[in-house]
Amino acid sequence: MAAIKENISRLLQQLAHTNVKLIAVSKTQPVEAIREAFEAGLVKFGENKVQELVEKHEAWPESGIEWHLIGHLQRNKVKYIAPFVNTIQSIDSLKLLEEINKHGEKWNRLINGMLQIRIADEETKFGLSPQEAHDLLLEHPFRNFPYVRLTGVMGIATNTENEEKLRQEFRLLKNTFDKLKQDFFFADDDFFEISMGMSSDYLLAIEEGSTMIRVGSGIFGARNYTK
Ligand SMILES: *Cc1c(COP(=O)(O)O)cnc(C)c1O
């Protein structure tokens, strides 16, 4: 697992003179790999499945890891992660937002949330269109959700090597963020995060304004889905 430490130090060097945050996407990776990355200095980890997230949290509950959920979340599963999750990056409906707020209240916790915006054509079914995100905030002022702190937006770009297409999608997310900020969070310091960029495209994403990249295989190596 020496490669994990080397990958992390290379990434941290690239981010050294930026304010860009790094989420280590540990899906399918064993807890030992998470420990390795944690010892190399990473604190923020991302998982895309609720059950896997809960298992990893329970395997090492005292770690101090800041867990981010980055995959689709069903409303009936919010209860499993509400006691410990730091940020839910994949809020894609009003109903889900209401459910997170409800469980935040139950645990008396402020849960960070990000609106997932659909920026790829057909690549993912999930996420709000920019207009839907705007309408949601217009119709449901964010102060109605006192147990959710909305920190920004998240997007998943098309899986392509076409640089111009990737840049267009990242720009769409940046523009969506700017508009939401201006219209709903103008005087609000909490709304500042643009989560975009993965192992193959994070440098482009940073050039286009990313404040948070989500890197899996670039840290842990290729994923083994057959395990
Ligand atoms: C898996 C995943 C990543 C990381 O992908 P890599 O290409 O391995 O860096 C980032 N974001 C989301 C939402 C993911 O599901």
Image: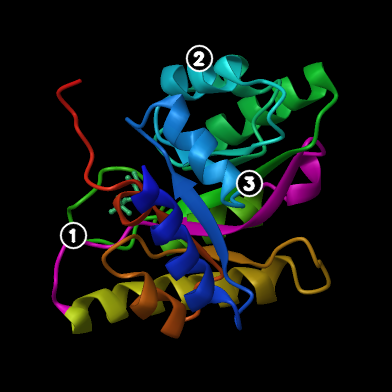
CA gap between label 3 and label 1 equals: 27 Å
Looking at the rendering, in which quadrant would you find the N terminus? Answer: top left
Depth check, mark 3 against mark 2: the one in front is 3
- Tell me which label, 2 or 1, sits earlier in the chain: 2
Q: Is mark 1 on a helix, strand or loop?
A: loop
Could you say which disc has been placed on residue 188 in the image?
none
Q: What element carries label 3?
A: loop
Q: What residue type is labelled 3?
A: Val
Q: What element carries label 2?
A: helix
Residue type marked 1: Asn
Q: Where is residue 67 in the image (x, y as percent from the top left)?
A: 59, 37
Q: Quadrant of the C terminus?
A: top left
- Label 2 to label 1, Cα distance in Å? 29 Å
- Residue beneath disc 3: 43
Give yes or no for residue 160 being in the magenta stretch.
yes
Magenta segment = 140-162
Say whether marks 3 and 2 touch (CB < 8 Å). Answer: no
**Residue under circle 2?**
76
Label for residue 159? 1
Query: Which numbered disc, 3 or 2, marks the residue that appears first in the sequence?
Result: 3
Q: Earlier in the sequence, mark 3 or mark 1?
A: 3
Whether residue 21 appears in magenta in the rendering, the answer is no
